[in-house]
Amino acid sequence: MTIDEIKNVVLEIIQDIDDEADLENLNPGEALRDQLDLDSMDFLDIVMELRKRYQIQIPEADYPQLATLDSCVNYLIPRLKAA
């Protein structure tokens, strides 16, 4: 998957979880939880959906690496190479 495809997947998952999320003004370097007012359950839903869609393991210790859109992409690139 390309960087843009991974970004789109993450944004699609966020949109599914919060259909009122303002994704157009999203700063990819800022924390998603702060920008979109996501609570811990929303964040966990994002992680679970990534696991489900792509059959990848995301250990809880790695959750901080999913804080921003950019960090999500950087984390997912090697894991979704074959997807």
Image: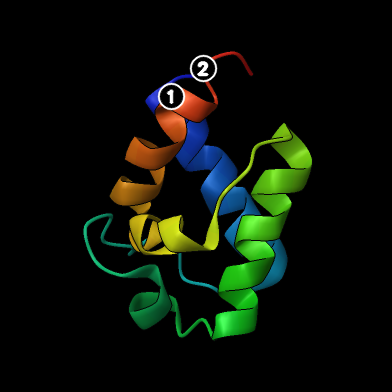
Disc 2 packing (10 Å; few <14; some 14–19; many ≥20): few
In the rendering, at what x and y percent does residue 80 appear? 55, 25
The answer to whether any part of residue 18 appears in the image is yes
Q: Residue at x 72, y 53 (%)?
A: 49
Disc 1 packing (10 Å; few <14; some 14–19; many ≥20): few
Query: In the rendered structure, are the residues bearing label 2 and label 1 in contact, judged by CB atoms less than 8 Å apart?
Result: yes
In the rendering, at what x and y percent does residue 59 appear? 55, 54
Front one among 25 and 36: 36
Tell me the element at label 1: helix
Would you say 45 lies left or right of 62 here? Answer: right
Would you say 60 lies left or right of 48 here? Answer: left
Q: Which residue lies furthest to the left in this view?
A: 29
Disc marking residue 78: 1
Three-letter code, disc 1: Pro
Three-letter code, disc 2: Lys
In the rendering, at what x and y percent does residue 72 appear? 40, 48
- For residue 75, which quarter of the picture? top left
Disc marking residue 66: none
Q: In this view, does 58 lie above or below 30?
A: above
Instruction: Quote the CA–CA distance across marks 2 and 1.
Output: 5 Å
Q: Residue at x 65, y 47 (%)?
A: 50
Front one among 83 and 63: 63
Q: Which residue lies furthest to the right in this view?
A: 52
Tell me the element at label 2: loop
Front one among 42 and 57: 57
Front one among 36 and 52: 52
Q: Residue furthest top?
A: 82
Disc marking residue 81: 2
